[in-house]
Image: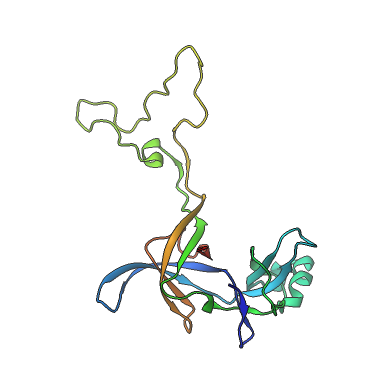
Amino acid sequence: MSEVTHDATVKLTGLFAFKEGMTTYYNEAGEAVPVTVLRFEPWVVTQLKTREKEGYEAVQVACRAKSAKNSNSAEKSRLKAAGFENGAYFIKEIRQEIPQGISVGQKVSLESLAAGEKVKITGTSKGHGFTGSQKRFNFAGGPAAHGSKFHRRPGSSGNRTWPGRVMPGKKFPGHYGDETVSVKNVQVIKVLLDDGVVLVKGPVPGARNSLLRLMRESK
């Protein structure tokens, strides 16, 4: 559900936040809950995309203003209507129906999230570079005995005269991480509106200060 609030901010079906790290939160029952701290910065509506013009409906938002020397003329003119003097470092969009009463320049409200809700969090996983198959695919590895010469190797690629080649997708060493990862049914533990902080249960993908997208789970 999307709506425009009395203080001229808008509630959307999704939000963007930055990952701070993990800590322990003690609930009212005294239980220790592992949580990830997400930092919410001021996001401003910069464009409303419609089916007639763009072919789909979405709300575009932007965050963190650039300096004049880091912005080109196209960025400046594009975001001028939203109140940006120059460009913005983060320009994202949330696909949803356009809320009634929404307009360019309004701020996005954190009140669209509430404790106890379930959200889907999408981010970019940590990059590990070129990695061996044991770490990349969680292989058990060979015997650890002194006589063994097979510890962390990938093993046979296994084919005969036919097809006479290694099949595509074989689990070999290669680039690991730096992929788009989504985690579903993540519980919102607490929302601190004054501090712009959201606590969610458990770990989420991404490194510290990386951007995450939070979408409400459809019921």
How far from the left and from the top, in percent, is residue 17? 52, 69
How far from the left and from the top, in percent, is residue 108? 60, 76
The N terminus appears in which quarter of the rendering?
A: bottom right
Q: Which residue is drawn at 67% across and 80% down?
A: 106
Residue farthest to the left, as pictured: 146
Q: Which residue is drawn at 20% across and 25% down?
A: 147
Instruction: Give the mark count.
Output: 0
The quarter of the displayed image where residue 70 is located: bottom right
Residue 45's place in the image compared with 149, above or below, is below
Residue 45's place in the image compared with 124, above or below, is below
Q: Which residue is drawn at 46% across and 53% down?
A: 126
How far from the left and from the top, in percent, is residue 216? 52, 66
Residue nearest the observer in this picture, 75 or 37: 37
Residue farthest to the top, as pictured: 161
Indicate left or right for 69 with 217 as reference: right
Residue farthest to the bottom, as pictured: 6
How far from the left and from the top, in percent, is residue 184? 46, 58
Indicate left or right for 104 with 33 as reference: right
Residue nearest the observer in this picture, 17 or 153: 17
Residue 18 in sight: yes
Residue farthest to the front, as pictured: 219
The quarter of the displayed image where residue 66 is located: bottom right
